[in-house]
Image (tube, rainbow, N blue to C red):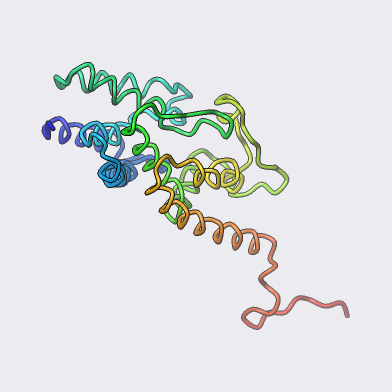
Amino acid sequence: MNRQVVERTARYVRDELFDDASGHDWWHVDRVRKLALALGRNEGADLYIVELAALLHDISDYKLNGGDHERGAHVANHWLISLGETQVCADAVSDIVIRVSFKGAGVKTEMRTVEGEVVQDADRLDAIGAIGIARAFAYGGYAGEPMHEPSASPQYHETLEEYMTRSGGTIAHFYEKLFLLKDRMNTESARVIALRRHMVMERFVEEFLREWEAVDVAGEAGVVPDREP
């Protein structure tokens, strides 16, 4: 394992993404790296490929670069070659980068290697649970989405183009993506973690909708509903 390549890649990604406010910042990448390495050890994956792919997986996220889902893979490939890495290594990493992201409920994003599976699982784990909730609203604010649009029903997007034009608000995003991820993990280790994080999201959305409709007001903290005279 070439630690110099890893360290230079980490510095490069940190410099590029540190000020991101969409939830795809350096700390997201760092968490994905840690999760992917832990999962990779359990699965017997090549940890060098795992770490590089985790570091570079959001170097040009299609949601932030105008919808070009291939650009991140090209950037990752060029970066690794510029550091003197082999084309085999660069291709293995870029293949993960181009496949890792969720692109709509009806779009298959299957990985071809165990390294890809653990990086994808790690990225999806960071999209759910308490941090996933925070990231969802961070991205919603960044994209100018409403927190909730009660009149908009969640959609099952069949294509990337449909998913890119979604407009139902952040709560709809839980139904259109986040609640689906628990059943789309590749590894058993990730499925165990995902189940707990999924339950955190379910409790949050249930409480959010109760408060949205003010159904929690009556009888709490001494507050009673207005009555007809």
Q: Looking at this view, name the residue that lies furthest to the top.
A: 87
Front position in the image: 17 or 121: 121
Q: Residue at x 51, y 38 (%)?
A: 143
* Residue 18: x %, y % from top left: 29, 40
Q: Is residue 32 above or below residue 49?
A: below
**123 displayed left or right of 202:** left
* Residue 172: x %, y % from top left: 61, 45
Q: Is residue 22 above or below residue 49?
A: below
Front position in the image: 187 or 180: 187
* Residue 72: x %, y % from top left: 36, 24
Count of numbered tags: 0
Q: Residue at x 20, y 18 (%)?
A: 81
Q: Residue at x 45, y 29 (%)?
A: 110
**169 displayed left or right of 131:** right
* Residue 130: x %, y % from top left: 44, 56
Q: Toward which corner of the image does residue 156 lie, by quadrant?
A: top right
Q: Looking at this view, name the residue that lies furthest to the right.
A: 229
| Quadrant for the N terminus in the image | top left
**228 displayed left or right of 52:** right
| Quadrant for the C terminus in the image | bottom right
